[in-house]
Image (cartoon, rainbow, N blue to C red):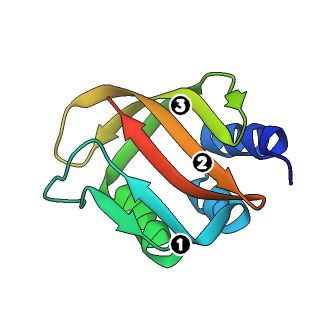
Amino acid sequence: METKEIAKRLADYCRKGDWDGAQKELYADNAKSIEPYATPAFSKETIGLNAIVEKGKKFDNMVEQMHGIEVSDPLVAGNSIAFTLAMDVTMKNQPRMTTPELCVYQVKDGKIVSEEFFV
């Protein structure tokens, strides 16, 4: 799959909040996920598709209600993909908030090999 096609499919999955679907279809088994910083819930870096899928499930279990997700059109440069993603979300035991971030992905051999999030 070409990087432009991966970018479109990834953005579509993210607009639906279907992290699991995106990861299982588009990510390499040895993919890496990098958060802006470590938190009590998540390490700064997660390596391997299975660990990334588990991280996604953990995030979903922390969500009380997802009110909306906005994803910009993706930008593609070579094997890099970037878009903005903003979630309007209520996490369990927390007030409603909007979480804007820049999402950057690297593609190799038709699969996403890294994702990194910036706030």
- Residue 7 located left or right of residue 95: right
Tally of numbered discs: 3
* Residue positioned 29% across, 27% down in the render: 97
The amino acid beneath tag 2 is Gln
Q: Which residue is mark 1?
A: 49
Q: Residues within 10 Å of mark 3 (few under 14, many from 20)?
A: some
**Precedes in sequence: disc 3 or disc 2:** 3
The Cα atoms of the two marked residues, 1 and 2, are separated by 14 Å
The percent coordinates of residue 21 (x first, y second) are 67, 61
Q: Which residue is mark 2?
A: 106
Give the answer, above or below, for where 28 lies relative to 40: below
**Precedes in sequence: disc 1 or disc 3:** 1
Secondary structure found at label 1: helix
Circle 1 or circle 3, nearest the eye: 1
The amino acid beneath tag 3 is Ile
Which quadrant holds the N terminus?
bottom right
Give the answer, above or below, for where 111 lies relative to 97: below
- Residue 75 located left or right of residue 95: right
Secondary structure found at label 2: strand
Q: Residues within 10 Å of mark 1 (few under 14, many from 20)?
A: some
The percent coordinates of residue 93 (x first, y second) are 16, 46
Secondary structure found at label 3: strand
Which quadrant holds the C terminus?
top left
* Residue positioned 16% across, 53% down in the render: 39
Give the answer, above or below, for where 37 lies relative to 82: below
The Cα atoms of the two marked residues, 3 and 2, are separated by 22 Å
The percent coordinates of residue 45 (x first, y second) are 31, 60
The amino acid beneath tag 1 is Leu
Q: Which residue is mark 3?
A: 69
* Residue positioned 59% across, 27% down in the render: 71
**Precedes in sequence: disc 1 or disc 2:** 1
Give the answer, above or below, for where 93 lies relative to 95: below
